Image: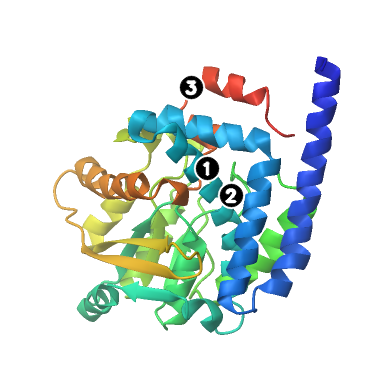
Amino acid sequence: MDRGRLVGSVVRKGTILKLERVLYRMAVVPLIAFLPASLAYKVACLRGDWCYWYDSCKRGEINRCLEEVLGDQLSPEARSRVTRDVFRLRSCQAVDVTRLLGKGQALARQVEIRGLEHIENALAAGKGAILCSAHFSSVDSCFSLIGTRGFPITVVGRWVKGNRAVENRSSIETFVSEFIHRKILQRHRHRPNIEPRPGKLGVAVQAATVLRNNELLGILLDPPVLAADRARAVPMKFLNGQALLLPGVVTIAQLIGTPVLMTFLLRSADWRHQVLQISPPVPVDGDPVAAFGNCLAVVEATIRKNPAHWVFWNSSDLVDLGLLSEKTTKVLAECRVV
């Protein structure tokens, strides 16, 4: 096949995939989300399997990213299995969000929360708590699930704008995320998201206000740093490389005396049940960068144990983090769906 026909084939496949994503999110998910959980997540997994089979470009990109970042931790067979599970998890996440409609009990019934007493103890002490996580599994649903239990939680993070993982979405996909899923997730949170702005320091002030009101603050430790904030970022050892990240969460915790609790939502082998794990307070005394490194080590260990749960197995985000070279990205770009 000559290059022109190859490019045409890739473009056609990309169009089909975009249409399929729109139909899945706007038609299929609303129809299946409130079926018995075993059936709803079975359909989501079947859809993920179809995407894994059909989207050979994305399948190859994820597989190559796993190999480049994790090295020989995974065998070729294990990488293929993890890659398939990445597609399944992405399909399940949309179902998770939709099941949060109303009081969120359709999702909450499928989730076992472990470590809730650490939140209760922190609030009893009167200085709030910081729940640290990563772009891991259904992290947005994770924070909203805590809100369904009546705990006042606010999240620091961008919704869509400036997020490389979603900037290539179609206008319909953006509408679904911005005006449907966002409203469902926000319903169970105490305040609107505190959204970082390039070069602005007001986020720390807003975060401190939440904690001084003895509320919960959800923060992700692994987002790629915006260009305007790179001067404040610190290179940290992470996943066999060095990622450029912002350790400000530890500074806030030290200034206010707030405990830091590591929080992860883990999906079970049956795909419908999940476990929300909340750790005891992590020590954050001493040097802020070293303390941040301790928190990041927990994130890394969790990703290594459950690699399919991490959402950043794509070349653009890994380059932004500093874990993948531009040279590797150019190779992957030859097959990327546009």
Dot 1 falls on a residue whose secondary structure is: helix
The x, y position of residue 113, in whole percent, is 35, 74
Q: Residue 182 carries which label?
A: none
The image shows residue 234 at horizontal and vertical percentages of: 33, 34
Q: In this image, 127 relative to 329: left or right? A: left
Dot 3 or dot 1, earlier in sequence: 1
Contact check, label 3 and label 1, Cβ < 8 Å: no
Q: Nearer the viewer, residue 157 or 76?
A: 76
- The mark lying in front, picked from 3 and 2, is 2
Q: Distance between the residues labelled 2 and 1?
A: 7 Å
Q: Nearer the viewer, residue 16 or 162?
A: 16
In the picture of the structure, the residue carrying the numbered disc 3 is: 325
Q: Say which amino acid is labelled 3.
A: Ser
Q: How far apart are marks 3 and 1 (CA)?
A: 20 Å
Q: Mark 2 points at which residue?
A: 87
Mark 1 sits on what residue? Answer: 83
User: For the residue carrying disc 1, how many other residues have a C-alpha within 10 Å: few (<14), some (14-19), or many (20+)?
Assistant: many
SS label for mark 3:
loop
Mark 3 → mark 2, Cα distance in angstroms: 24 Å
User: Regarding mark 2 in the picture, which secondary structure is present there?
Assistant: helix
Within 10 angstroms of label 2, few (less than 14), some, or many (20 or more) residues?
Answer: many
Q: What residue type is labelled 2?
A: Phe
Which residue is most to the top? 2
